[in-house]
Image: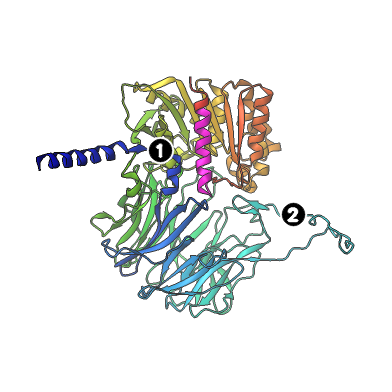
Amino acid sequence: MKTYLRSLLFFFMGTVLSFAQIQSNLELIDIFSMEYISDPQISPDGTKIVYVRNFKDVMTDRNLSNIWITNFDGTNMRPLTTGNQNDFNPIWSHDGKKILFKSNKEDDKMKLYMMWVDTKEIMPLTNLPQSPSQIAWSNNDQYIAFNMFVPKSKSSIIKMPSKPEGAKWNTPPTYIDDLNYRGDGQGYLKPGNMQLFILSIDGGSPRQLTFTDFDHGTPIWAKDDKSLYFSANFHKDEELEPNDSEIHQINVATGQIKALTKRYGPDQDPALSPDGSKIAYTGFDDTYQGYQVTKLYVMNSDGSNSKIISKNFDRDIGNINWDANGNGIYFQYDDKGDTKIGQITLNGKVTTLVEGLGGLSLGRPYNAADYSVSNNGKFAYTLGGTKHPADLATFDGKTTKRLTAVNDDLFSFKNLGNVEEIWWKSSYDQRDIQGWIVTPPNFDPNKKYPFILEIHGGPFSSYGSVYSAEIQAFAAAGYVVLYSNPRGSTSYGQEFGNLIHHDYPNHDYDDLMSGVDAVIEKGYVDEKNLFVTGGSGGGVLTAWIVGKTDRFAAAVVAKPVINWYSFVLYADGTPFFYKYWFGKKPWEDPESYLKRSPLSYVANITTPTMLLTGEEDFRTPIAESEQFYAALKLENVETAMVRIPGASHGIANRPSNLIAKIASVLAWFEKHKN
């Protein structure tokens, strides 16, 4: 018996040792196993939450999602929809008995569905060639309003002769005369506009309310359900003035439209007070700065007595919701790399309620989050953190509670890199700069590790204390990684963001190099193996860096701008970029465009440099990468170009694209290790 027990003990000890041994670092294929929570919508009475659970299919290389439901305390958690499809955008009715959501569960067409929550019965409300976009319940729950793209015919002045019967000619030429003729992730734009509709919950044909040649934003219902409020830019020069929208009201019965705001700058995201007497909205007085903090305003529902509420709050305000008494407004904001929920009174006093939101940007560590609030002041939100993508959490006014851990099945046997916040002084002007150091799993501070500087895009955006599959993959490959928020980043106020106004890229270089030095001072970085990469605005800075220094062993420039002169005429935001980032058209100030273009410094480059861009990127078109590639070849610099087929600016529209990007970066760096 003792021998048997000893053998049994050794068996279990061996089993434990085996489990310890299979603990491993993340691999790129693990990205297909990562999930995250998005769009948490709490019921009006605060008792239930519906949310979207996002996952991936390794066999079809698709991002998929289903809708789940739980009680506020986390009990009775279960799926409302299932299947390898995209179910998303759940919206509660005011009585809490039904939800609307979108899905392509029946075919590739995205339809709007209504579900009775108690029985899970589902009824399709639309079967249209186009999918409804933003949706709102009427206050009596009998109708919905939404905006939807309506195509319009556009004739060509090019008249082709009739071809002989049976002849096989090429597709007729495409005739374009719009300034904005293509969009990133959308391709070449079809003629038409986003129009407003209403639809009975009994189904049938939606009724179109607007027929203008302009786009109409998210509709919300007036208290009496007789009109809708929405944002739109109806100015005749709206193509050239993209930031000049107003809040409007439309009479549902007559279609008559009335402008409620009138100033130069965007007025958007209207939210009606509980008693229907006031409208809160966001915007700013446009001064053509590269970065302008989004402010909060309140006016009477007829457009009178508009006043700014957040004048003394130096952070962007978004996702606004009135409290139940109409005495204040909840909102979401980013502060020094952390996303928070705040409350502001009508007198402008701000209180922070919840911190640590995030986790919606699976690739890189951008601040991205969401929340909703019930009529009795309970919150559901996406919980971020450096150790996991977004999970579901709640706040009852006193305490927070995490309800899900959707990646514990994966992370229970995977080692993650540790993330540590760091601050340093910029060598340019001694400003405080924030960043995060990520060390490899099983890190030993007495060893020397290769190092990657990873730079965010935007440039007016921010990284934070959130999970990043891309950064963790670099750490798993044995690199120390630094990511940071140099000058120009959001979440530090308007003055800090506009330090790069008409001066980008320039002194953010000093911020970044000072950060590299700060990490090196810690003693565990191999100075012979420094690497740098970044995407979009980070690609601009990476290209700028190799033109200014040779301290990096290799660089990967992802989806960059190389030549500002060509970019502002070729990107999908032509009216915006020249006006806000330069102030003059290229031919009016060619010197500034060339001075700020990384292409101008290509003769200085000796660093082996890879270019990486999606072939369908219309934000920083691949022609920018092609210019730099050709220039580097002419200068006899070691270079390569990676083209991601079918990818737009976001690249990771398919999971394998994100993997391809990471694998390309690591391959280039491994090739050039000393």
Mark 1 crowd level (few <14, some 14–19, many ≥20, 10 Å Cα): many
Secondary structure mainly formed by the magenta segment: helix
The residue shown at (35%, 75%) is: 118
* CB-based contact (under 8 Å), mark 1 and mark 2: no
Q: Quadrant of residue 186?
A: bottom right
Q: Identify residue for label 1.
A: 472
Looking at the image, can residue 372 be seen? yes
The residue shown at (49%, 66%) is: 102
Residue type, label 2? Ile
- Give how far across and how far down residue 312 sits, in percent: 38, 48
Mark 2 crowd level (few <14, some 14–19, many ≥20, 10 Å Cα): few
- Give how far across and how far down residue 575 sits, in percent: 64, 48
Asked if residue 662 lies in the magenta stretch, the reply is yes
- Give how far across and how far down residue 473 sits, in percent: 43, 37
Q: Which residues are magenta?
A: 652-669
Q: Identify residue for label 2.
A: 176
